[in-house]
Image (cartoon, rainbow, N blue to C red):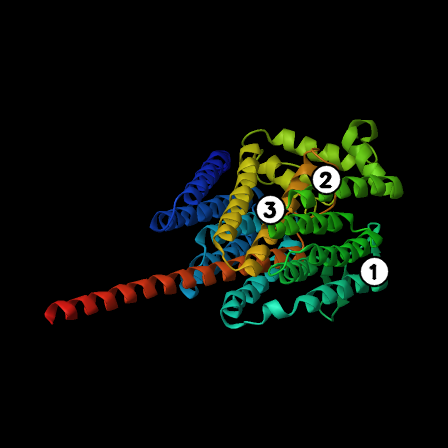
Amino acid sequence: MRQYITELSKYAITGCMVFYTLLGFLGLLGGGNKKRGFYPAQCVCMFLVQLLCFLDLALVSGDMQYVLYYAFVQVFLLAAAIMVPMIYEDVNRELLSGMCMLSGIGLCMISRLSFDRAVRQYIIVLISLIISLLIPYMFSRVRFLKKLTWVYGLLGIAMLSAVLILSQVTHGSKLSFTIRFTLGKVTFQPSEFVKILFLFFLAGLLWEDASFVRVALSAAVAGMHVVILVLSRDLGSALIFFVGYVFVVFAATRNYLYLLLGAAGGAAASYMAYRIFSHVQQRVQAWRDPWSSIDSTGYNVTQSLFAIGSGSWFGMGLLKGNPNDIPNVMEDFIFSSVCEELGVVFGICVILITVWMFLEMLKTAAQIHDRFYQLIVYGISIMYIFQIFLTIGGGIKLIPLTGVTLPLLSYGGSSVMTTMIMFFIVQGIYIRLQQAGGRQYDGRKQDRRRRARTDAGRRAR
C-alpha cells in the first residue's frame, strides 16, 4: 500500500505543480479582481505539493521527524501566504505566492538531503521573513532613501574590501566571514547583501540625471565593486553585479550604445578571466567536454546530467535517487536533485515560475512613475533572473559553472535572506504604487462630488 501511495503521489505532485504554474501565467495576463481570484487556488496547490512531498519522505524513510518538520514548514507558509496579505492588503499576491512556493520546495529538498542543515535553513528563512515584514512599513514611512546615494556605494565597497582582506579562502575564493558562538557558528556572505546597496546606489545616482558624467561616475564605482570581487575570486557574484549594472544603466538612459558597450566589455572580461584564472579554464573545459575528464574536473557536471536524465519526466521519487553523489548539491546543484527525484516536468515548472516572477517584477516596474524606485525594481528583477540563469544553466551544461546559488531553493542563509529582502523591497514599492493609485482615485471621486454639488447648487438657484 505504501508503495502505491508514493508512486501515485509523483503524478499528483507534478499535476499540482503544472496547474499552479498555469495559474501564475494566467494571473500575469489578468488584472484586478481576476488576478486575486487565482491566489487561493495557487495556495491550495502549494499546500498540496508540500503535503504530498513530506508524506513521501515520511513513508519512504519511516522517519517521523519529517512529519514534525512538515508542521514547522507549514507554519512558515501560513504566515507568509495568509498573514502577509492581512497585514499589507495591497501586497502583490503573485510575487508572494511564487516566493512561498519556491521556498517550500527548497526546504523540502534540503530536508531530504540533510535534515540537520534543513533545520538551520528553516530558522534562517523564518528570521528572514520576520525582518522582511518590516520593509514595506519602512518604505511607507522613510523619505530620505534617495539622499544616501554615496553611503550605499561606499558601504558596499567597504564590506567587499573587508572580505578580501580578512576572510579565509574557501574552495579557492574569499566569500564569507564565520562568526563562532558557544552554540555553533554563523557564516555571513557580505556580497549577497551588497547587491541591495549596489542597486540603491545606482538608482540614487541615475534616477534624476542620467547624463554621461553620472554614468561615468557609476561605472567607476561599479568597477571598484567588480574588481574587488574578482580579486576575491568570487567571479559568479562579479558577473551578477556587472550584468545588473549594465541593465540598470540601460533602463536609466534608454541608450542602446551602453548596452552594446556592456556586452563588449563583458566578453573582454570573460576572456581575460579565462586567461588568468586556472579554475575558470577548468570549468570551461568541463563545459565543453565533461566526459573526457569525468573523474576530475568534469565530475560535477556529468553527475548533474546523470541525475537529471535518470529522473525522466516524473522523477524517481523522493529518497529514491542519489543526489548526494553530486558535490555541493545543496548549494550549486539543487535543481539537478529536484529533476532527479521530482521529475523534469517539475523542474521545467520551477523555471517557468521564476520567469513568471521576473515578468511580474518588470510589469510592476513599468507602472512606477518614480524613477528611483523604478530602477531598483528593474535591477532586482535582472539580478534575480540572471542568477537563475547562471545556476540552472551551469547545472544543465548550457554555460560553464559559476558556483552561485539558486535563489530561495539552495542551501545558504545569506542567499535566502537577501532574496527574501529583495522581494519585500519590491513589495514595499508595489504597495506604495497601489496606495498612490488609490489616493488619486479617491481624489478624482471627491472632485466629481464637488462638481456635482456645484452643479446642483447652480440649478437650484
Relative placement, left or right, of 136 versus 230 is left
Q: Amino acid at mark 1?
A: Leu
Kindly tell me whether residue 427 is visible in this rendering: yes
Q: Amino acid at mark 3?
A: Met
Q: Quadrant of residue 48?
A: top left
Q: CA distance from mark 2 to mark 1?
A: 29 Å
Label 2 CA crowd tier, 10 Å (few <14, some 14–19, many 20+)? many
Dot 1 falls on a residue whose secondary structure is helix
Label 1 CA crowd tier, 10 Å (few <14, some 14–19, many 20+)? many
Dot 3 falls on a residue whose secondary structure is helix
Q: Label 1, on which residue?
A: 164
Which disc number belongs to residue 109? 3
Q: Are marks 3 and 2 in contact (CB under 8 Å)?
A: no
Q: Is residue 318 above or below residue 201?
A: above
Label 3 CA crowd tier, 10 Å (few <14, some 14–19, many 20+)? many
Disc 1 or 3, which lies upstream in sequence? Answer: 3
Image quadrant in which the C terminus is located: bottom left
Q: Amino acid at mark 2?
A: Ile
